[in-house]
Image: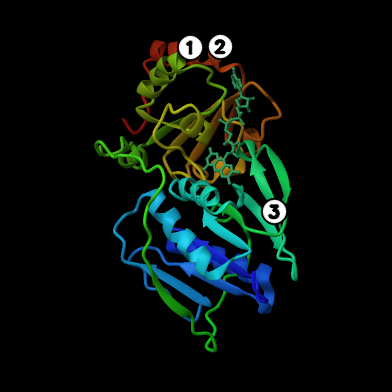
């Protein structure tokens, strides 16, 4: 690190990159430089950062971005590389850290950079937000990822006095690069989910994949589409996508949340529903503060009875 500490930023999403630039500027104060590797095809306001790297590479693989960032690191020697915690960013950041021999932590919700030594300390979310980890890195290279909205910093206004140094990067992908043997479009329920009148939104209270048959029987009666919380998609891989802060947002007539705790990161995905109903066996679950209708019950006892009653009474949703 030179006299002036540098933070290097990258995200493929321009809005997230701007957020990270704001957080970097706040951490650096007036005495440091912010360098940005621009997303492909995005024009960066040269008054917004101190160094802009661009690339003409068409390779959008995690390995290629990690190689480009490593090239940017060797030019700027940043105290910190801040990467957007998107699906792609979460693949790029650890590859970069390994490549440049940096300390690494994911899901930062705050960080500081000590003036003088350039030592980085970071607070990071663990276990999908269930715990916090505090990292104190030795001075040297550090890579962090941060999700949209996780680092609350004022947006950095472009400065008329600032004109970023610009440089074009090319990078060789070396080491172990995966071989792409085929590309298939991702299975997605997004279009149908967004059009659905009812969303049957399940969480970790649903224990086994076989239990989806029970949930589907409820969805069929309500003419609803299935959706889930993040752990059911990212950890258990039951669905291609989830609802919430880092997932999809829906606004149906009815969202029925089953075995969902009601974490705010999830609720932002369903809070525009006309009616939120929830089934949870914990009467203190946070979801009950958000729901219009709440049932404290074991879902495995309650749902079969619900299905039976709806069938017995020949009830149909208003939208069917
Ligand atoms: C930066 C960040 C972004 C995030 N973004 C998202 C996001 O976009 N979307 C998202 O969903 N999460 C997101 N998360 C994770 C989020 O914080 C929660 O951890 C997650 O939503 C919890 O999922 P859950 O409700 O399925 O599981 P849990 O929190 O484990 O809740 C399960 C619930 O099921 C109930 N239950 C258990 N057994 C039964 C039963 N038999 N009958 C009835 N109820 C039962 C329990 O009482 C509990 O309330 C994010 C976290 C972070 C840190």
Report which residue position mark 1 lands on. 304
Per the model, the C-alpha gap separating discs 1 and 2 is 6 Å
Per the model, the C-alpha gap separating discs 2 and 3 is 44 Å
Nearer the camera: disc 1 or disc 3: 3
Whether residue 75 is visible:
yes
| Residue 157, image x, y percentages | 55, 78
Secondary element at image label 1: helix
Instruction: Please rate how many residues cluster around mark 3, counting C-alpha atoms within 10 Å: few if below 14, some from 14 to 19, many from 20.
Output: many
The quadrant holding residue 125 is: top right
87 versus 47 height, above or below: above
**Looking at the image, which residue is at 31% across and 42% down?**
191
Residue nearest the observer in this picture, 207 or 3: 3
Report which residue position mark 2 lands on. 301
Instruction: Say which label, 1 or 3, has the lower sequence index.
Output: 3
- Residue positioned most to the front: 175
Along the horizontal axis of the image, is 183 left or right of 134? left
């Amino acid at each position: 690190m030179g006299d002036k500490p540098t933070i290097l930023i990258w995200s493929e999403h321009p809005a997230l990159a701007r957020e990270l630039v704001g957080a970097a500027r706040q951490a650096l104060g007036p005495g440091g430089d912010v360098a940005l590797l621009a997303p492909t095809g995005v024009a960066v306001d040269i008054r917004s950062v101190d160094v802009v790297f661009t690339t003409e590479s068409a390779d959008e693989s995690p390995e290629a971005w990690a190689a480009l960032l490593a090239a940017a690191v060797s030019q700027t020697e940043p105290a910190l590389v801040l990467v957007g915690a998107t699906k792609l960013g979460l693949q790029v950041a650890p590859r970069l850290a390994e490549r440049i021999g940096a300390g690494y932590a994911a899901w930062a919700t705050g960080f500081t950079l000590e003036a003088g030594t350039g030592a980085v300390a970071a607070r990071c979310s663990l276990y999908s937000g269930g715990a916090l980890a505090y990292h104190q890195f030795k001075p040297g290279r550090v890579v962090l990822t941060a999700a949209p909205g996780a680092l609350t910093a004022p947006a950095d206004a472009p400065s008329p006095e600032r004109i970023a140094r610009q440089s074009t990067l090319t990078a060789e992908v070396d080491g172990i690069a995966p071989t792409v043997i085929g590309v298939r479009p991702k299975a997605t329920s997004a279009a149908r989910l967004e059009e659905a009148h009812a969303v049957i939104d399940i969480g970790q209270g649903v224990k086994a994949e076989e239990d989806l048959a029970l949930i589907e029987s409820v969805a069929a009666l309500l003419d609803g589409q299935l959706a889930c919380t993040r752990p059911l998609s990212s950890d258990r891989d039951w669905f291609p996508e989830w609802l919430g802060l880092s997932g999809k947002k829906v606004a149906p007539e009815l969202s029925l949340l089953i075995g969902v705790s009601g974490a705010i990161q999830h609720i932002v995905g369903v809070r525009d529903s006309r009616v939120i109903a929830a089934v949870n066996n914990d009467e203190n679950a946070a979801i009950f503060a958000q729901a219009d209708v709440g049932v404290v019950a074991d879902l495995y006892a309650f749902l079969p009875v619900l299905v039976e009653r709806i069938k017995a009474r020949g009830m149909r949703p208003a939208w069917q």
